[in-house]
Image (spheres, rainbow, N blue to C red):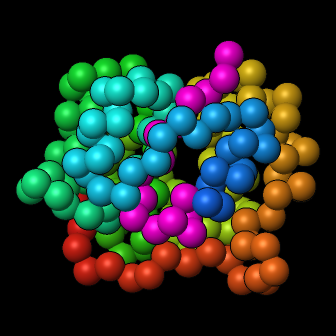
C-alpha cells in the first residue's frame, strides 16, 4: 500500500526536498499546494493518506492553516496530518497537536528532523519501515550542490 501524500507549503524548495525524501521511502506525492484554498480542493480530489501542512501557509479566501486543518479533520478524521512549523510558533503548534495532528517537525529541516519524521510515519504506516533506514542514509536534506539545510523564508503570518 503506497502512502499518498498531499503537501501544503508555499515554499517550492521545501516541497521539493520533502518530495525527494518521501519518494525514497516508497511514498507518492500525489498533489502539492502553496495555499489553503488550493489545498482544500486537492484534499477532496486526491484523497491522500497523509497530509503535510505548513502552519504558516498562505491564507486565501480567509482560510488559514488551523481552519484548513479543522476542515480536513472534520471531513476525514482518520487521515493523518503532519504539521511543519518554524520555531517562532510554539503556541500554534500546541493547538494543532491538541486537536489531533500526527506530529510537528520544525524548520529548518535537517537529517535529524527527517529521521524523527520517519520514525513517526513508520508507527502510522508500518510498511514504510522496510525502506526507512536506508532512505535516511541515501537522501540527505541538503539541496543538491548545497551543504546547508533547507530553510524557508521567514513569514510573519501564522495560522
* Residue 71 lies in quadrant: top left
Residue 64 image point, x, y percent? 19, 55
Left or right: residue 55 versus residue 19 is: left
Is residue 8 magenta-colored? Answer: yes
* Residue 101 lies in quadrant: top left
Vertically, is 133 above or below 155?
Answer: above
Visible residue check, residue 136: yes
- What span is in magenta? 1-15
Label total for image: 0
Vertically, is 99 above or below 147?
Answer: above
Residue 109 image point, x, y percent? 61, 67
Residue 2 image point, x, y percent? 66, 23
Is residue 11 magenta-colored? Answer: yes
Q: Nearer the viewer, residue 16 or 89?
A: 16
Left or right: residue 117 versus residue 145 is: left
Left or right: residue 10 versus residue 35 is: right
Q: Quadrant of the C terminus?
A: bottom left
Q: Name the residue: 39% across, 82% down.
A: 154
* Residue 148 lies in quadrant: bottom right
Q: Name the residue: 72% across, 42% down.
A: 23
Q: Name the residue: 85% across, 35% down.
A: 131
Amino acid at each position: 500500500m503506497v502512502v499518498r501524500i498531499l503537501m501544503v507549503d508555499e515554499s517550492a524548495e521545501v516541497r521539493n526536498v520533502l518530495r525527494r525524501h518521501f519518494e525514497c521511502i516508497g511514498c507518492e506525492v500525489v498533489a502539492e499546494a502553496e495555499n489553503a484554498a488550493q489545498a482544500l480542493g486537492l484534499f477532496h480530489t486526491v484523497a491522500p493518506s497523509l497530509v503535510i501542512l505548513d502552519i504558516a501557509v498562505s491564507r486565501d479566501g480567509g482560510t488559514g492553516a488551523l481552519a484548513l486543518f479543522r476542515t480536513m479533520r472534520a471531513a476525514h478524521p482518520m487521515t493523518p496530518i503532519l504539521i511543519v512549523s518554524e520555531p517562532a510558533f510554539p503556541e500554534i503548534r500546541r493547538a494543532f497537536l491538541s486537536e489531533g495532528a500526527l506530529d510537528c517537525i520544525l524548520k529548518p529541516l535537517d537529517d535529524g528532523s527527517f529521521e524523527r519524521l520517519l520514525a513517526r510515519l513508520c508507527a502510522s504506516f508500518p510498511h514504510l519501515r522496510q525502506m526507512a533506514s536506508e532512505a535516511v542514509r541515501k537522501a540527505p536534506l541538503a539541496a543538491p550542490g548545497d551543504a546547508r539545510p533547507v530553510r524557508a523564508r521567514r513569514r510573519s503570518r501564522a495560522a
